[in-house]
Structures are given as C-alpha cells and as structure tokens.
C-alpha cells in the first residue's frame, strides 16, 4: 500500500468518525424536542426513554462516503448499494416512527435485495469447493442469496438489545471486512468498511453514555444488517480463490460465518427455542444471548457486551487459524462443535433463571 492510498483511507476513517461525533448530538436534540422515543415494554433493559434514531447518521455517512469513494475508485457498486440501502433505511425509519407490519417489512427487504442483485458484483456463482460445490446454478444461488440477506438483516436487528452490543459487533465485523478487502486489493470497499468502523467507534461514545445516550433503532439495525449482508455477498461473489491469502479458499464461507457468529447463532437458537415451546418464532422474549447473560450474571450492559464481543473475537481468531491450515470439513466441524458447546452452556444458564428467559 503506497503512502497516497494510506492517507486516502485514513481520510475516510477520520471523516466518518468526525461526522458521527458531531452530527449525533444534533440528532439527539431533534429526537428529544419532538419526543420521538423508543416504546417501553416488559423486555426493555432501560427505565427511561432514550432516542432511537442513531441509524440516520450512519446512512448519511454511507451515502457521502460511497459518493466520494466512487470519484477515486471508479466502480458501479454505489449505483446499486445506495438505492437498495435507501429502501431499507426508510423501512426502518417508518418502523421507528409509526410501526410497520412484519410482512410489509419483509416485502421491502425483498425489493431492496432485488435491486442489489441486479449488479453482477452482488451475485454468487461459485463457492470454490466449499462442501464440494463450485459453480452454482441460478435457480439455486438466487433464492439462497435472498434467504441469506433477509435472514441476516433481521438477525442483526434482533441482536440490538443492549447498550453497545450492535455497535461493537458492527465495528468488529467491518474491521474484518476491511482486512478481507485489503487481501482482495479492493480499496474502494475497504474505504467504505473503514468508514463504518470509524462511525461505530464514534457512535459508541453516545450508545453507552449516561447523559447523551442514543440507540440505533430499527432505522440503524435494519440498514446496517443489510449492508453487512451485501458486503458478504460481494466478497463471496469475487474470484477470491485467485487473490486471497488462504491455503484453503473453500474455507472463506466458514470464516465469514465465524466472523458474524453472534447474530447468526443467536437468531437460529432463539427460533428453535420458541418453536420447541410452541410459540410464534417471531414473538419477542428474553431468550437472546445478551438477555441470558444479563439476567443470570446480573451484569451491566457494558460487561455483557464485553463478554459477547470477546467470545466472538476469540472464535474469529481461532477459526482464522483453523481455516488457514485445515480443509473445510475440519473447519466446519470445529465451528459446529463450538456452536454445540455454547448452546448447551446457554441452555443451562437459561434453565437456572426463575422465569427461564421467557
């Protein structure tokens, strides 16, 4: 990386950090003035009203950064990312302001994902040997890609339950993406990811604050979940087997799942628990990972967030080693083994609670 590129990437990171740091207090003032607070319920971990439109600044930053980055790294990805992200952003904004039905929310996610998939930069056609699969037929990859994006949008939305968790996970995920894009020599998307890291670091100052607290809200969590899923699709759509520094290129999908472990594992686990208890899988409760840790250990939000981030980071480091030196069957076995152990531990903790996390 030459010195010009280094300073350019530093510019994107710093600009996003500064924008988030100085624009967020303005958003907080507007929300308080208009009393646009998050609804309180029996699942809430807070006793006071808190503004929940932090995602507005994230969207503004993404549009600015993509527009500027296109001037330096000429690609067509902004043409598809911005319109599709806009649909998701307004869906979350509508949900935060007046509410939106689950089916309308899913429909908007399908439309936004369809816009994204028009671009060949967001179409997976080859898994490079993962589970013995190479080229994928369109009738398989298109529905699968839709499922991945829509599942992850809602998975990230569900994990946004305590102060600092979604923001810290976002910073971790986009750091991993930035490193991956560096390996792929894709400096435009690396700039976008570094910008998001800077934004999350600045946002954490307010997300965990006692006097200037603000939440992502659905405006932020849906939009960020969509952006993360879009980036995963973009990375896996590349001919990464020829570029990325990994002995077993077929392991990259496993490494991606490991990086995004917490939202993916928690959503699947919660849905299974609800179905086992003959409950609506979309009905809210306190069976999420963060709720179980909070309720059992009586941790503060910061401690619970630290535990979950440390666990996800440790898993990513371990799987980074495993995927570098072992084939995908061994790597997948290690990941599934970790999932099984973690699921058993959480089950025992939940069963020890008086209300069993319901």
Image (spheres, rainbow, N blue to C red):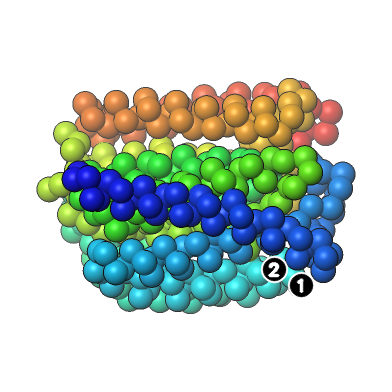
Figure check: 208 above or below 199? above
Query: Which residue in the structure is indicated by mark 2?
Result: 95
Image quadrant in which you'd find residue 272: top right
Q: Quadrant of the N terminus?
A: top left
Which residue is pictured at 29% across the width and 69% down the height? Answer: 71
Residue 241 shown left or right of residue 261 in the figure:
left
Residue 323 can be seen in this image = yes
Residue 149 can be seen in this image = no
Which residue is pictured at 41% across the width and 63% down the height? Answer: 65
Horizontal and vertical percent position of residue 222: 57, 60
Residue 159 shown left or right of residue 354 in the figure:
left
Depth order, front residue of 43/49: 49
User: How many neighbours does mark 2 have within 10 angstroms: few (below 14), some (14-19), or many (20 or more)?
Assistant: some
Horizontal and vertical percent position of residue 60: 53, 66
Res 269 label? none
Query: Which residue in the structure is indicated by mark 1?
Result: 98
Q: Element under label 2?
A: helix
Q: CB under 8 Å between callouts 2 and 1?
A: yes
Measure how far apart labels 2 and 1 are at the Cα level.
Answer: 6 Å
Image quadrant in which you'd find residue 103: bottom right
Horizontal and vertical percent position of residue 282: 67, 56
Q: Quadrant of the C terminus?
A: top right
Which residue is pictured at 67% across the width and 46% down the height? Answer: 206
Q: Element under label 1?
A: loop
Number of numbered discs overlaid on the protein picture: 2
Residue 29 shown left or right of residue 192 in the figure:
right
Which residue is pictured at 35% across the width and 75% down the height? Answer: 79
Horizontal and vertical percent position of residue 322: 29, 27
């Amino acid at each position: 990386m030459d010195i010009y590129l280094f300073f350019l990437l530093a510019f994107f990171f710093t600009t996003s950090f500064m924008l988030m740091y100085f624009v967020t207090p303005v958003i907080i003032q507007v929300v308080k003035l208009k009393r646009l607070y998050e609804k309180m319920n029996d699942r809430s971990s807070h006793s006071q009203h808190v503004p929940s439109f932090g995602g507005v600044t994230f969207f503004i930053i993404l549009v600015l950064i993509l527009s500027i980055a296109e001037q330096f790294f000429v690609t067509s990805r902004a043409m598809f990312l911005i319109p599709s992200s806009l649909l998701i952003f307004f869906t979350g904004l509508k949900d935060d302001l007046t509410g939106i039905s689950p089916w309308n929310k899913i429909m908007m996610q399908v439309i936004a994902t369809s816009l994204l998939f028009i671009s060949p930069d967001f179409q997976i056609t080859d898994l490079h040997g993962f589970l013995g699969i190479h080229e994928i037929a369109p009738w398989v990859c298109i529905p699968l890609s839709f499922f991945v994006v829509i599942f992850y949008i809602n998975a990230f939305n569900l994990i946004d339950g305590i102060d600092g968790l979604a923001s810290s996970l976002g910073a971790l995920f986009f750091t991993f993406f930035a490193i991956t894009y560096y390996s792929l020599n894709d400096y435009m998307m690396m700039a976008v990811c570094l910008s998001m890291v800077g934004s999350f670091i600045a946002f954490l100052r307010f997300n965990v604050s006692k006097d200037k607290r603000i939440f992502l809200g659905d405006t932020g969590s849906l939009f960020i979940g969509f952006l993360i899923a879009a980036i995963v699709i973009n990375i896996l759509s590349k001919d990464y087997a020829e570029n990325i520094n990994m002995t077993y290129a077929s392991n990259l999908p496993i490494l991606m799942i490991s990086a995004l472990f917490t939202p993916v594992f928690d959503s699947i686990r919660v849905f299974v628990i609800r179905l086992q208890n003959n409950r609506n899988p979309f009905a809210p409760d306190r069976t999420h990972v963060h709720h179980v840790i909070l309720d059992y250990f009586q941790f503060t939000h910061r401690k619970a967030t630290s535990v979950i981030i440390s666990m996800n980071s440790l898993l990513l480091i371990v799987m980074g080693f495993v995927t570098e030196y072992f084939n995908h069957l061994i790597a997948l076995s290690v990941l599934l083994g970790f999932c099984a152990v973690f699921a058993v531990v959480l089950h025992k903790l939940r069963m020890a609670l008086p209300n069993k996390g319901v």
